[in-house]
Amino acid sequence: MKKSDLLYVIPPAQHNKEDLISLLELHPEIKFVSFVGIDFAGNDTDEKIPISLFIEDMDIFLNEHGPQTDGSSVVMPGIATLNNARVDMLTDKDVNWFVDYNCEHFDAETGKMVGTLRIPSFLIHNDVFVDSRSILKNSLDHVRGELLALCKKHPKIYGLEHIDASEINYIIFTCATELEFWVKSPREDAPIEALSSSQMMQEQYWQRTRGNVRTAMEQAVEALELYGLGPEMGHKEVGGVRGQMDEAGHMTHVMEQLEIDWKYSMGLQTADNELLARIVVKEIFRMNGLEVSFQAKPIPGVAGSGEHTHIGLAAKLNNGKVVNLMSPTDLKKEFLSAIGYGAIMGLLKNYEVINPFVSSTNDSLNRLKPGFEAPVCIVTSLGHTPDVPSRNRTILAGLVRDIDNPMATRFEMRSPNPYTNTYLALAVFYLSIIDGIKAALESGKNLDELCAELSKKHGTEGFYLEKDREYRTEEDVFEDFSEEQRNKLFGKPPATVWENMCAFKEHPEKTAVLTKDNIIKPVFVDSFVQGALIRWKTELVNRILPDNLAEVMEMYCMHETGESAWDDELWNKIDELRHCLFKDSADGFSLATKIRKAVREEDFAKASDLQLEMAAKMAELRALYHDYKLNIID
């Protein structure tokens, strides 16, 4: 069987009954259809509908609605309830459809892998679209209309002197994601000390892949090319240790961090491509006997996995020419156009209410801590001078530019991770961007004045940005500022899911930017928050506490009491912490019991504080036990 004999993509031009029947007749190995809706948590639906039924009811599936599902089984609390749970699916005919092949199931007649046609869809409840894909589509449509109206009103835009903005015919949302992930041998873990040391010595970054890791990487890149994603690179990332080879020549003890990148796309297609890439990567590595983790921070104390998201704005003019709206006329003299400055100001000013959509899990916030190149501050970097583009890897939103290629100008959001809901993240990015663009264009300020606004110091009044904040630095955020300085200048970052979700109530004027004109309905925000908090408290009680307890139970006294005063003192500190964490007594409850009680009583602010206290004590306990073990000599 040749890979070229399979059907991987059905583009929008062929989403009609005649072409689809013809294609499916040519590819009888495609046995099933799955309508793919995305809930507020980013989960995708996957059902197997026989292809014969799809063909029989194709008119209904294409033009009326797809299958129905139970809304209580997807994440949209407060919307689809148990007593009103019906959710319909509506086919999206404006994006690519992909065929997902099962590498372990072959069609007896054709000898080809059995395929499932995955059709991106919208979810409808009570005649209202209630899914992540529709939120992104509606958000981009809204931003497109707003930006076109602004360009008609302000045809001469600073930094875009080479075009007449009133001649813009269509707005193009250029986006891209980068996928980082960890891969390991099943049931094998490398010591954290080895992983940390390898990272510090930079032993793995850009190193050669070997064995089944190399094979899986190459196969994944090939597969993404077949699906039309245009893969650009696959390589090792900073984390990992060198694997071993057994007598049969197979790699064992694999623990590596990898990254795969592919070409940018537009709007919804970008998010659909990212979902496909994760599926392809996970299946191909599994087929090679390897486990893949897309967690943001799968290993404490070692680099986590990001999914840097690039966002840009382009326009098609009436004459057919495409221009980058963020690039200034002279890239050697200016960093950005007025639209570019407005875009980054909108992102930064409203980031407190963007962040919950980007980082809605314990895992995601575990990654966003100083020391591992993950962003912790709401701040950007432009570079020291326009003629020498630079990249500051310590900030939240980085300006990416090439003075020889005006189409390359864009912003890289460094906070998303592989499990960020890309559909919602892109929606809130662009809704915030248009808020800043409107402020910049309506102000009438030139590029120097806009740059001064973005670069203003703490305590300086701005026409758009907040007085007691700074939004730009060319310094190293981690090395050149203390934690106290960072919090004062750039805002204190949320440490728990609860703290992050509180942003919507703490910043109602910023929440209003996202819910303006009902693009993201307030009920959708409430549902998203409910879902995130359900997952947070469930994981806290049913996973984090038991995992910490299991770790504490494995810590035991390794020496004879009285033989060494040093060991006695150290073990007493360790045992005191163990009891503080998990042992109730007549003197009071343990931290674990206090957390369970706070969650049960729905005192989430207290549960959040106790979670941070437990995390700090667990970190202290691990360090003490590490030192204790090193001092034990038989």
Image (spheres, rainbow, N blue to C red):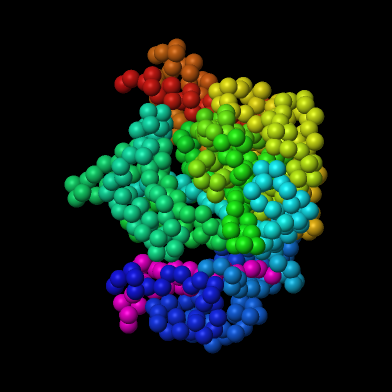
Q: On the image, which quarter does residue 69 sit in? A: bottom right
User: In the depicted view, which residue is nearer to us: 365 or 230?
Assistant: 230
User: Which image quadrant is residue 28 in?
Assistant: bottom left
Q: Residue pushed farthest bottom?
A: 56
User: Residue sitting at 76 percent across and 50 percent down?
Assistant: 154
Position of the C terminus by quadrant: top left
Whether residue 64 is visible, yes or no, is yes
Q: Position of residue 344 (x, y in %)?
A: 66, 41
Front residue of 306/282: it is 306
Q: Is residue 292 visible?
A: no
Magenta span of residues: 97-124
In the image, residue 186 lies at what x, y percent? 36, 50
Question: What is the chief secondary structure element of the magenta stretch?
Answer: strand
Q: In this image, 151 relative to 546: left or right?
A: right
Residue at the image position 58 percent from the left and 45 percent from the top: 410
Q: In the image shown, does 51 or 259 lie closer to the viewer? A: 259
In the image, taking residue 534 as reference, residue 114 lies left or right, namely: left
Q: Look at 56% across and 68% down and name the residue there.
A: 95
In this picture, residue 113 sits left or right of residue 575: left
* Position in image of residue 411 (x %, y %): 59, 43
The number of numbered discs placed on residues in the rendered structure image is 0
Q: Determine whether 498 is above or below 265 in the image.
A: above
Residue 119 position, x and y percent, is 54, 71
- Residue projecting furthest to the left: 247
Q: Quarter of the image for the N terminus: give it.
A: bottom left
Residue depicted at x 37% and y 28%: 201
Q: Is residue 10 magenta?
A: no
